Amino acid sequence: MTSLNDLPIRDDLRGLSPYGAPQLDVPVRLNTNENSYPVPEPVVEAIGKAVAAELRDLNRYPDRDALALRADLAAYLGHGLDPEGVWAANGSNEIQQQLLQAFGGPGRSALGFTPAYSMHPLLALGTGTRWVPARRGVDFGLTVDEAVAQVREHRPDVVFLCSPNNPTGTALDPAVIAAVLDVAPGMVVVDEAYAEFARPGTVSALAVLPGHPRLVVTRTMSKAFGFAGGRLGYLAADPAVVAAVQLVRLPYHLSALTQAAARAALAHRDLLLGTVAAISEQRDRIVAELRRSGLRVADSDANFVLYEVGGDQSVAWRALLDQGVLVRDVGLPGWLRVTAGTPAETDAFLAAMDKIQREGPSAPQSPTKGTP
């Protein structure tokens, strides 16, 4: 049987594994930062009608520029944005890939402050962009001085800032964004995939957009909207940035069905976003309970929590899985990440963690269940 390495694959892709988290059939899945609440029935009906209305014309290509959807997204974001300053694609991953295709590429570099979203270096690799792993500071924070010093040292063509950051959950001080914009020679991309979950008083980079044509803010409908299966990400930026990514986007990249479903979801955003407060409450509950039990926990403005297990994180991950709770091993020694879900899911997670702390992680019951 032919293996991957038998093919004339690029040398820089040899030995790599595709991005992805385990998709295991367990009672409590808290490893991919999905919204645990199902889509409400009125929204299901609205999306169904919107999609059905497109079916007869599937012999025609969709609106290549998704003009109506971009108008709806601009209205949702506010901040005086026009549709010309918004662009949509199949998830924020595709948005960020298009940005690297337009502003990165061979002979150029992209910098991110790690630990951060692990897809960013993979997107850089796929686009031939050299990746520069800068570092975060104490407790996964990032100060103005730390950020500026590393951007000045490496002078990247693209800087990725995440607020709130994945996997740590920490939000950025707006002063960091402003300082990086002052010294970065190229584009500055602020990944705000979890912005809707941020605690009161957290300032979005959208407020900084006016007068900064090299700033891009990326968002997604996967998390707060519970639209992960719909695959809809978007950016807000100067219209010139939208013109740039249109040079590299695939023709008709966003299907008519996706556009219709996303517009129906946006039309019912008050109902869909009604789960944000409930999820944030569970996030804060997890933080408080884990700290009460003596564990270190990173501050979180997202729908997940990063916490220190006090030992080998892969052993703790397996011990949780053996109790039917799936969390994420993000590769940080001694730390695990858990998604905030429903109250019942939080109960199950906290009970499993309590058992591990009281009894210690036991030997795995089934070594073939999966890998972190």
Image (tube, grey):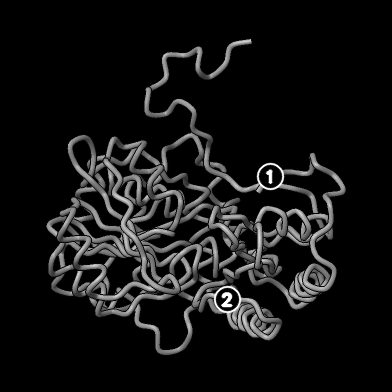
Crowding at label 1, few (<14), some or many (≥20) Cα neighbours within 10 Å? some
The quarter of the picture where the N terminus appears is top right
- Comparing 109 with 90, the one in front is 109
* Residue at 39% in and 84% down: 202
Kindly give the residue lying farthest to the bottom in the view shown. 201
When the figure is inspected, residue 12 is found, relative to residue 121, above or below; the finding is above
Side of 308 where 71 appears, left or right:
left
Mark 1, secondary structure of its residue: loop
Q: Is residue 110 depicted above or below 193 in this figure? A: above
Residue type, numbered disc 2: Val
Q: Disc 2 marks which residue?
A: 297
Q: What residue is drawn where x is 83% and y is 55%?
A: 322
**Between 365 and 247, the one nearer to me in the picture:** 365
Neighbour tally class for label 2: few under 14, some 14-19, many 20 plus, Cα within 10 Å? many
Quadrant housing residue 342: bottom right
Using the image as rendered, state which of residue 187 and residue 121 is in the foreground.
Answer: 121
Report the side of 256 relative to 286 (left or right): left
Specify which label sits upstream in the sequence, 1 or 2: 2
Q: CA distance from mark 1 to mark 2?
A: 23 Å
Quadrant position of residue 47: bottom right
Residue 66 at what x, y percent from top left?
A: 36, 53
- Label 2 sits on a secondary structure element that is loop
**Residue sitting at x 41%, y 63%:** 219
- In x, y percent, where is residue 117? 44, 56
Query: Which residue carries the number 1 mark?
Result: 371
Residue 222, x across and y down, in percent? 53, 60
Question: What residue lies at 25% left-to-right and 46% top-to-bottom?
Answer: 246
Residue 364, compared with residue 295, is above or below; it is above
Residue 304 appears in view: no
Q: What's the residue type where badge 1 is placed? A: Thr
